[in-house]
Every structure is written in structure tokens, then in C-alpha cells.
Amino acid sequence: MTELIRSNDIVLIGFARSLLEGAQIPLFVADEHMSALEGSIGAFGRRLLVPDDHAAQARRILTDAGLAAELRDDARG
């Protein structure tokens, strides 16, 4: 899995998720339910993950939608 976005902004995560689901790209939002444990203060960022073989296409879609600044570094390691 490749992490594309990490953010406390639920609107941003929701928008990115909607774009990717609309393009039928499988995804997983990690730490989505941490807000219940943290008291909904936004201390833990949610992580938008896609399978490695869909990462390039997902990056293009999110970049075309104006979210390039939100994308995590493509480097692995």
C-alpha cells in the first residue's frame, strides 16, 4: 500500500476519497476511527492509502484536482 495523503482535515480526506472512488481506485483510510479514542480533537491524522499498482493513477487524479501540495513524498524507504 502507498500512503498518498496524511491529514487531520476530514473534508480533504473525504474529497480525495470521493475522487478516487469515482475512478474506481481501491483505497483504505487508516486511523479513521481514532477520533473516538482521542475525543474528536483532531490530534491524529487520517492516512489515505491505495494499492501500489494504483498509486501513479491516483496521484494523477489528485494532482489534476489541485491536491498536489497535499500528496506525501513518493520516495520509499
Image (cartoon, grey):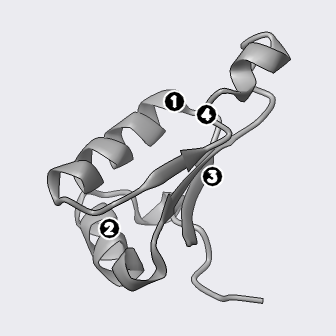
Q: Residue at x 43, y 29 (%)?
A: 11
* Disc nearer the start of the sequence (2/3): 3
Q: Name the amino acid, label 3.
A: Arg
Q: In this view, does 2 lie to the left or right of 59?
A: right
Q: How far apart are marks 1 and 3 (CA)?
A: 10 Å
Q: Where is residue 68 drawn, in percent x and y?
A: 42, 66
What number is the disc on residue 63? 2
Which callout, 4 or 2, points to the residue nearer the camera?
A: 4
The foreground one among 57 and 33 is 33
Which callout, 3 or 4, points to the residue nearer the camera?
A: 4
* Disc nearer the start of the sequence (3/4): 3
The foreground one among 28 and 59 is 28
Cβ–Cβ under 8 Å for marks 2 and 3: no
Kindly identify which residue carries mark 3: 6
Q: Distance between the residues labelled 1 and 2?
A: 18 Å
What number is the disc on residue 32? 4
Which callout, 1 or 4, points to the residue nearer the camera?
A: 4
Q: Which residue is drawn at 44% across and 39% down?
A: 12
Element class at badge 3: strand
Q: Name the amino acid, label 2.
A: Thr
The foreground one among 54 and 6 is 54
Q: In which quarter of the image is the C terminus?
A: bottom right
Which callout, 1 or 2, points to the residue nearer the camera?
A: 1
Kindly identify which residue carries mark 1: 10
Q: Residue at x 35, y 77 (%)?
A: 54
Q: How far apart are marks 4 and 2 (CA)?
A: 23 Å
Q: Name the amino acid, label 4.
A: Glu
Q: Which residue is drawn at 65% across and 27% down?
A: 33
